[in-house]
Image (tube, rainbow, N blue to C red):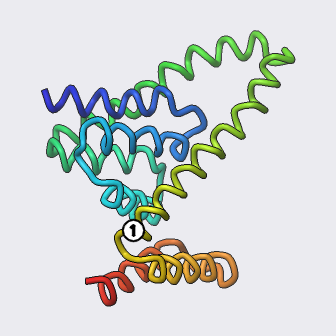
Amino acid sequence: MIYWQIFKANFIANMLGYGGGPATIPLLEHEVVDTYQWYTTQEFSEIVALGNGLPGPIATKLAAQVGFDVGGVLGSSIALFATIAPTMILMLILLGILMKFKNSPIVIRLTLYVRPAIAVLLGVMTYNFFFNASESAGIIHTAIIAGASLLFLEKFKVNPVYVVLGALLYGGLFLS
């Protein structure tokens, strides 16, 4: 039963997450935090932060971690397959349709309308992560980590891996 739940959680998130890996993060969060309660929001946000620091697509990294935590190596394999399958199936179907109607005004408008929806999903996820972090760690520590991260990423162009590691170090020193 757990393997079916792993498959379903990843398949649904990736089937509905139009726009790539970042668009699936809030959907996967809903499945693993709210529906199945395998993680808390804070635990899931830590997995996302670590996953963003590693090279490669975020959706597959999250699937592998969730599947492994819940169902071991087999769970990880099932989660990876469930993550890749919807994209592969839909790409084959959509490619045929889009090539047939690529100059249609409807297709062009659809693409323009989807982008803001993805931005809203990512904004809501960011707000939830920030709100949960400020509740558990306190607003001052959250502001320090967020401000320092923004400074290092944008002004000094530090690699995100080092920013995440620095935030983990700060949390380990001051929030333990």
Q: Nearer the viewer, residue 176 or 102?
A: 176
Around disc 1, counting alpha carbons within 10 Å, would you say few (fewer than 14), some (14 to 19), or many (20 or more)? few
* Place of residue 107 in the rendered image (x, y in percent of width and height, measured from the top left): 78, 19
Residue at the (39%, 44%) spot, across then down: 29
Instruction: Give the quadrant of the C terminus.
Output: bottom left
The picture quadrant where one finds residue 134 is bottom left
Residue beneath label 1, please? 135
* Place of residue 162 in the rendered image (x, y in percent of width and height, measured from the top left): 47, 79
Q: Which SS class for mark 1?
A: helix
Q: Is residue 71 above or below residue 175?
A: above
Residue at the (30%, 35%) spot, across then down: 35
The picture quadrant where one finds residue 77 is top left
Q: Nearer the viewer, residue 125 or 131?
A: 131
Residue at the (48%, 40%) spot, across then down: 24
Instruction: Give the quadrant of the N terminus.
Output: top left
* Place of residue 136 in the rendered image (x, y in percent of width and height, measured from the top left): 34, 70
Q: How many marks?
A: 1
* Place of residue 76 in the rendered image (x, y in percent of width and height, measured from the top left): 24, 42
Residue at the (18%, 31%) spot, across then down: 3
Q: Label 1 amino acid?
A: Glu
The picture quadrant where one finds residue 82 is top left
Outermost bottom residue: 173
